[in-house]
Amino acid sequence: MRLPEATSSFRDDTASSLPTNGQPHSSWPANPRRAHGKAQLEHHHGPHRILLVDDELDVLQGLRAILEEAGYVVTCTTNLRLATVTLEHESFHLVLTDLYLGDTDLGYQIADVARKQKPSTPVIVLTGRPTFDGAQEALRSKVADIVVKPVDAQTLLATCRRVILETELTRRNQELETANRVLSSVLPRTIEMKDPTTSGHAERVVGYTDTLAMRCGVGPADRANLRLAALLHDIGKIGIPDHILTKPGPLTDDEMEVVRRHPAMGYEVLGQLDDHDDVRTWVYQHHERWDGKGYPQGLQGEDVALPGRILVLAEVYDALAEERSYKPAWPIAKIVALFRDQAGRHFDPDLAKMVADGLERTGSRYFSANPGMLF
Ligand SMILES: [Fe+2]
């Protein structure tokens, strides 16, 4: 059994009374298996830190030895007051506390402090006397787990690892949610600030493309990429000068030429999405036409894959169905007539017919089948 290396991390007024040859409590195996060694627990930000709280010194010593042997950095305290102060001044990956601390304090109380940390610190409570009331109290205090004593080192370490991992996953999940909000909300807003005529356009086109993709039997992977392409299809407009993008009245040929570069600029901007070639391609192709008269490449028919053709149509549908500064919202009947007229010209004929029929049957509800499932 390795003794604590230093008492500097031992937060207790009675630290000097620690037995120098402290042996673990009889409940604790002296040598946890090396399988729980440092290599498994090393984190890219360094080893995990645990705040250990117990008012029985021999138990504290035993637990500390087990945890340190497994590679944790352990700070020990023997009462609630010191634990609270320590927790408020240092950060830990986990608090491991005995349920009964002295005559009056309960380990749960540290959970209230730990929960207010940013990020909150998970708490495991150790108890020799599990009760129904205790379980209720644990729920109320939102402790991560309760470990019933006596417990073997393997179970204790497995619980610590699991709780730390779950906390880490929750934190990463929150980061991903934030990143997702940036992608799905902040980025479209940025495009709209450049081109205020298209408020909410990208988000609506995401919904329209996904509804159509679902109706056409496009698979889930392509649908996910198509949602991304729909969200970002006009991102290249960031590269178009404001005086052209917001010019009232018709554009000159030269200005039109600049506007027509936005699919290529979008393709360029999305170069970092190097494992999402389809997304980039569909952004690049969103102004192509079935008859080859679109831009930038003048592709024809099925040269543009079905998801790309869906995006072409959905983008036009939104432009027609919404009011713009230069035109009112078109009534459904007028949109239906245009889709029928442009089937095989601007649009994939089968797709245009399917949408025209659907709009005729159910009106704009045809496009709002799944409004809440974008990302
Ligand atoms: Fe566009």
Image (cartoon, rainbow, N blue to C red):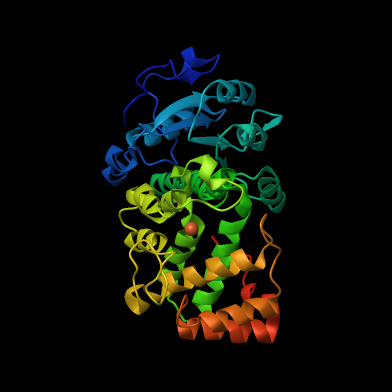
Depth check, front residue: 363 or 336: 336
Examine the rendered structure and indicate whether residue 95 appears above or below residue 245. above
- Asked if one can make out residue 347 in the rendered structure from this viewpoint, the answer is yes
Residue 174 can be seen, yes or no: no
Q: Report the number of discs.
A: 0
> For this rendering, which residue is in front, 62 or 140?
140
| Horizontal and vertical percent position of residue 156 | 44, 45
Residue pictured at 48% horizontal, 41% vertical: 241
In the rendered view, would you say 27 is above or below 303?
above
Rendered residue at 31%/39% (across/down) = 31
Q: Residue at x 50, y 30 (%)?
A: 51
Question: For the view shown, which residue lies furthest in the front direction?
Answer: 252
- In terms of depth relative to the viewer, which is nearer, 316 or 176? 316
Quarter in which the N terminus is drawn: top left
Q: Quadrant of residue 102?
A: top right
Is 371 or 190 nearer to us in this picture? 190
Q: Is residue 227 left or right of residue 67?
A: right
The location of residue 28, given as percent across then percent down, is 42, 40
Question: Where residue 159 sits in the image (x, y, percent)?
Answer: 46, 48
Residue 47 image position (x, y, % from top left): 36, 33
Residue at 54% from the left image edge and 60% from the top image edge: 375
